[in-house]
Image (cartoon, rainbow, N blue to C red):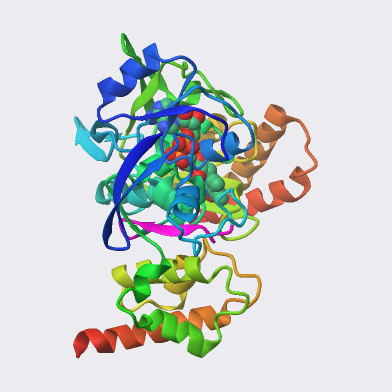
């Protein structure tokens, strides 16, 4: 049995926001695939607010050249959603690799972000697409770049009275885009390594490269210096090996030396070689 | 306590559940559906799988209140006409059942696959049952049974 709590099902965003502001010790639940596991292990909240069916928090819309993703949209839906497959292929691929069919039918992208695991599969693709989250409370709304919203492993700057109202991403067209992940088993196992990439190249030159690496550092990150190096550089083995060396150095700079790097970094090197050589 | 209303295996059903109760608990303890089992309780083994609007979900990680207004199917649905479903026949014929603990969940994942994809290849089948663990068969017989059932279902729908 789970610890005792009172649960309410929100039918509209405003209802969820007003409960969040008025109820004592509230917690949002969407798919429950992270939260139910934690509550089962003893984590207690007085009130649980179910937002999985809130229409304003579901689906993907396009506006002014941006894509707005409802946080309660499931991984299953995002992996096959036309606008995501066309404009953010790395995200569609990553969502299609999360957990198992059951986990993808239940788990949502908002839950994946808010849980802020270093291994969350949707985060590297969202970073590549410069995701901005809208955080709403009953009385206010603010926009925060995803990169700033995650402040430490499993810690975000989302206030307890706030919910993610939407996730805004920039479509990338004309890029070679994808997501590579290494997991202990094909399914279930949380990623041991995840790389999202979007690369534009022409006549043997890298015009633009966006990379995001998950599960290597406390938070998934974009190696910006490496991206700068690639921009405008000739596409050859010298550039590629420089870029990889810099990436690995940056990881060690962020995290220091970790026992897992003995196997992780060589695997990352292999993935980056494949990705950059294309 | 709250009362939830949903369709269970094709029948309108109402039941009183606690706010902190899982769908797994409500099905087993209040509705007597013990084919839905608790293995790991944390979404890894799949023996608690039920279909929610024909898609597989883990009932151990689902609050019972989430079933309100939805269509819930358990393995009993497959033989509700009194005869075994072609998938169940195929599982029996292929020896896809040993201890039987994973079988209800396995059948539901397979059934959901066949609803969406009448002609699954080996990869589709493996993917569809990847959220259900079996520690006896080694999966080969299960995959074979699903493949065979797909053939039978195709014939049935053509005839
Ligand atoms: C067996 C198993 C395998 C898994 N495999 C993977 C995997 O391969 N890759 C991966 O990335 N993850 C994996 N996960 C983790 C999990 O499934 C994902 O993180 C999922 O996306 C969480 O979404 P949810 O809707 O279920 O979140 P919930 O459990 O409902 O919520 C998680 C957190 O997010 C908060 N939250 C939810 N929605 C909002 C919102 N709109 N605004 C503010 N806060 C919100 C909740 O309050 C809670 O703190 C796995 C989990 C399990 C149990």
Q: Nearer the viewer, residue A182 or A76?
A: A76
Residue A222 or A74: which is nearer the viewer? Answer: A74
The spot of residue A192 in percent (x, y) is 64, 48
Q: Magenta stretch mostly in which secondary structure?
A: loop
Residue B69 is situated, as x and y percent measured from the top left of the image, at 27, 46
Q: Is residue A230 visible?
A: no
Residue extent of the magenta highlight: B45-54
Residue pictured at 49% horizontal, 35% vertical? B20
Residue shown at 49% from the left, 25% from the top: A147
Q: In this picture, is B68 found above or below A275?
A: above
Asked whether residue A36 appears in the rendered view, the answer is yes
- Residue located 58% across and 49% down the image: A272
Above or below, B123 against A78 in this view is below
Q: Which quarter of the figure has residue A166?
A: top left
Q: Quadrant of the N terminus of chain A?
A: top right
Does the stretch in magenta take in A204?
no
What is the count of numbered marks? Answer: 0
Where residue B19 appears, as percent x and y from the top left, is 44, 34
- B47 in the magenta segment: yes
Q: Is residue A42 left or right of residue B158?
A: right
Which residue occupies the foreground of this view, B157 or A23?
Answer: A23
Q: Quadrant of residue B85?
A: bottom left
């Amino acid at each position: 049995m789970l610890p005792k709590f009172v649960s309410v099902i929100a039918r509209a965003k405003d209802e969820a926001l007003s409960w969040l502001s008025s109820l004592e010790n509230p917690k949002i639940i969407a798919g429950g695939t992270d939260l139910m596991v934690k509550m089962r292990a003893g984590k207690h909240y007085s009130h649980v607010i179910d937002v999985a069916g809130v229409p304003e928090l579901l689906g993907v819309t396009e506006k002014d050249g941006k894509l707005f993703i409802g946080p309660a949209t499931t991984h299953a839906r995002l992996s096959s959603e036309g606008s995501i497959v066309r404009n953010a292929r790395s995200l569609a691929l990553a969502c299609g690799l999360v957990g198992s069919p059951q986990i993808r039918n239940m788990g949502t992208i908002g839950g994946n972000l808010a849980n802020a695991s270093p291994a969350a599969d949707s985060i590297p693709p969202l970073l590549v697409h410069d995701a901005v989250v809208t955080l709403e409370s009953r009385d206010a709304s603010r926009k925060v770049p995803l990169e700033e919203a995650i402040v430490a492993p499993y810690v975000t700057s989302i206030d307890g009275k706030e919910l993610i109202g939407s996730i805004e991403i920039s479509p990338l067209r004309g890029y070679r885009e994808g997501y590579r992940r290494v997991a202990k088993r094909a399914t279930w196992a949380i990623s041991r390594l995840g790389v999202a990439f979007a690369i534009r190249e022409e006549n043997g030159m890298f015009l633009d490269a966006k990379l995001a690496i998950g599960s290597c550092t406390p938070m998934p990150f974009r190696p910006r210096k490496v991206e700068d190096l690639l921009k405008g550089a000739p596409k050859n083995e010298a550039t590629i090996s420089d870029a990889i060396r810099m990436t690995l150095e940056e990881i060690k700079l962020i995290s220091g030396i970790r026992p897992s790097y003995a196997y992780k970094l060589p695997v990352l090197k292999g993935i980056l070689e494949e990705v950059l050589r294309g | 306590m709250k009362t939830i209303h949903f369709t269970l295996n094709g029948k309108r059903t109402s039941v009183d559940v606690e706010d902190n109760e899982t769908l797994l608990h409500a099905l087993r303890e209040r509705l007597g559906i013990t084919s839905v089992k608790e293995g790991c309780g944390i979404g890894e083994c799949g023996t608690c799988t039920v279909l929610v609007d024909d898609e597989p979900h883990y009932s151990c990680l689902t609050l019972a209140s989430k079933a309100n207004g939805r269509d819930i199917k358990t393995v009993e649905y497959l033989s509700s006409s009194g005869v075994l479903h072609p998938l169940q026949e195929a599982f029996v014929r292929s020896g896809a059942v040993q201890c039987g603990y994973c079988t209800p969940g396995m059948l539901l994942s397979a059934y959901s696959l066949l609803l969406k994809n009448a002609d699954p290849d080996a990869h589709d089948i493996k993917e569809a049952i990847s959220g259900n663990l079996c520690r006896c068969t080694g999966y080969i017989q299960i995959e074979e049974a699903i493949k065979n059932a797909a053939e039978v279902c195709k014939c049935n729908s053509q005839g």
